[in-house]
Image: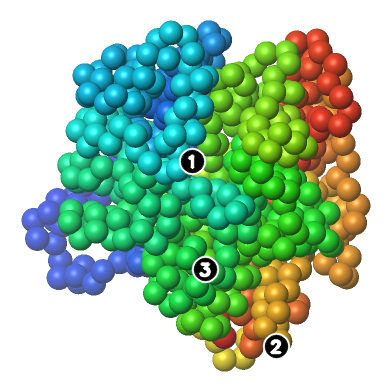
Amino acid sequence: MNFIGRTLALTAMVLLGANSSMAQMHAGGPDDLSESPAIYSPYVERTAVDSNLAEGVYWGDTHLHTSYSTDAGMMGSRLTPADAYRFARGEEVVASHGQRVRLIRPLDFLVVSDHAENLGLAPYIDESHPELMKSEWGRAVHDMVKAGNSRDAFQKWIGEAVTPGEDQIDNPRMMQSVWERQLAFADQYNEPGRFTTLIGFEWTSISTTDTPGNLHRVVIFKDGSDRAKQVVPFSAFDSYDPEDLWDYMANYEKKTGGTILAIAHNGNVSNGQMFSVNRLNGRKIDKKYAEMRARYEPLYEVTQIKGDGEAHPLLSPDDEFADYYNWDKSDIVGMNPKEDWMLQYEYARSALQVGMQLEEKLGVNPYKFGMVGSTDAHTSLATTREENFFGKASHLEPEKDRWEHVIIGSLSGDPKLSSYSYESTSAGLAAVWARENTREGIFNGMTKRETYATTGTRIVVRFFGGWDYGEDEVFSPDAVATGYRKGVPMGSDLKQKPEGKKAPTFMVGALKDPWSGNLDRVQIIKGWIDDDGERQERVYDVAVSDGRTIGEDGRCRTPVGDTVDVENATYLNTIGDAELRAVWTDPDFDPDHRAFYYARVLEIPTPTWPAYDAKRFGVDIPDSVQMKSQERAYTSPIWYTP
């Protein structure tokens, strides 16, 4: 028998023996096999921390308007909530002005957040709905629109309803009917595991002080229509005070057993009121106010079309990246110029510090929020990429001169206090780390503040804080599990300082959007309250691309470079890195100081939407218009409390 033959014969004998042994084991087996074998699979004894970690990042828009918002519908938007959902799911739709449009990739979730004030007025005018026609004022607005005077009808609504805060229609049946339509749309397009529709609306308060401030909130339900239909949206006609909104939310939870949260808008047009140390009634913030706000407003919309609200150069003079689409000219209606003292109560970084100052006095931090971005688009189109931007409103959809159109005209008549289309960014997106793409999964990720914001691209970021991350653990294949096991994720509080540990350690990793620019750098922003109770901050570069170095001061002073060809609206990913990771220990930690830390990730420079417009339409746009920028992401903070 040759070698091959002998080998085959031996193999047959071994297999026969194995089969015989298996037969004996099935028949009862020898007693000496009762001892459990060693565990090979590393997932058999997975810890509770590992089994509950959020493994998926889900992308969405928590702030989108359709024609059911009166300002959108009466100013030309024709798309419905159904169109908004279909578009977000990745389908092609036709925009209000007739252009075909589609996303580069579908979103994972969407909140249609139409304004509560006279919700559905525009479609009810279009239908000549009987409930609307019962109102004399409603008939008058209806007739103006039908006669082709939509702009005059809109101004009538602003002047006679919104500004004085009076519901001129005041028909509960109409509100309930429209709300049930909204709920039906949400339920129709909700597909757990694939696409999530979170039920919501916008409470559109403008404070009635001498300097009007935008205090808008998006209200989001964890629940389905069975609970949400037991109430109707709370509007500014009911109250312009957020404390009354929180009472509405508390009453909803008590009545239905449901759960609800609110997201405050970017505060840069709030005239120092979004994160003030005073209540809207002028009294100082007290413990009850702080508790209610902390309970019902876990998130902040840090970036959107109407500017970016992370930081401001006057507040952060040592941060060269703080000057990013700051809307800082006036109040929301362009009546009064912005005053410098207001800024500290409008931007996220300073607001987080103000919150810690209040916590030292009250024992509760009212401004302990996570970060999200969203659009605030009034087009039904959640377009957040610069090359696919369809504008703030339907009259700002792509055309050759839209860059110079007015978004918010100054009521004072001063053009310097008006806001123009070219000052807007295509931001932003909300990223939620969650276990599953369902209403419960996304909502729970929001309440845990395990969220972050981007200015429109899909940078993937993870950020953990603890006390003993190893320098190389961020590069291990189980880095995420280690992040949870040894510490806490973004949006959390650092665990108590272990004996012998001198300073917290943070683990951060960022991955570029494959359809966008490479990464420039990853930074950790620290804010703290010093011995005198004063606010302090510092920016640290913790990972930089292209082999650049970080100095002893914690900063990389070498710019990443610039490949943007403005004339052709192109760029190259020949600079920057696709991925950046770091483990960083705070070199200036003082265990007696309250502090927060969040990560900021910057892309390399890329063209802005005016650059794409200039190329596509062949128009000359002034040099004063920003033609390139660095897209970015902001994580929710991690807090340290002595």
The earlier-in-sequence mark between 3 and 2 is: 3
Cα distance in 3D space between marks 3 and 2 = 28 Å
The earlier-in-sequence mark between 3 and 1 is: 1
**Most extreme residue toward the left, as rendered?**
27
Cα distance in 3D space between marks 1 and 2 = 45 Å
The earlier-in-sequence mark between 1 and 2 is: 1
Q: Which residue is mark 3?
A: 282
What is the crowding at mark 3: few (fewer than 14 residues within 10 Å), some, or many (at least 20)? Answer: few
Q: Which residue is mark 1?
A: 163
**Most extreme residue toward the right, as rendered?**
558
Spot occupied by residue 463 in the image (x, y as percentages of width and height): 59, 60
Give the camera-side residue of 382 and 570.
382
Rendered position, 363 above or below 442: below
Spot occupied by residue 251 in the image (x, y as percentages of width and height): 24, 59
Give the secondary structure at mark 3.
Answer: loop
Give the secondary structure at mark 1.
Answer: loop
Which residue is located at x 73 percent, y 56 percent? 339
Q: Which residue is mark 2?
A: 531
On screen, residue 8 versus residue 472, left or right, reads: left
Rendered position, 353 above or below 503: above
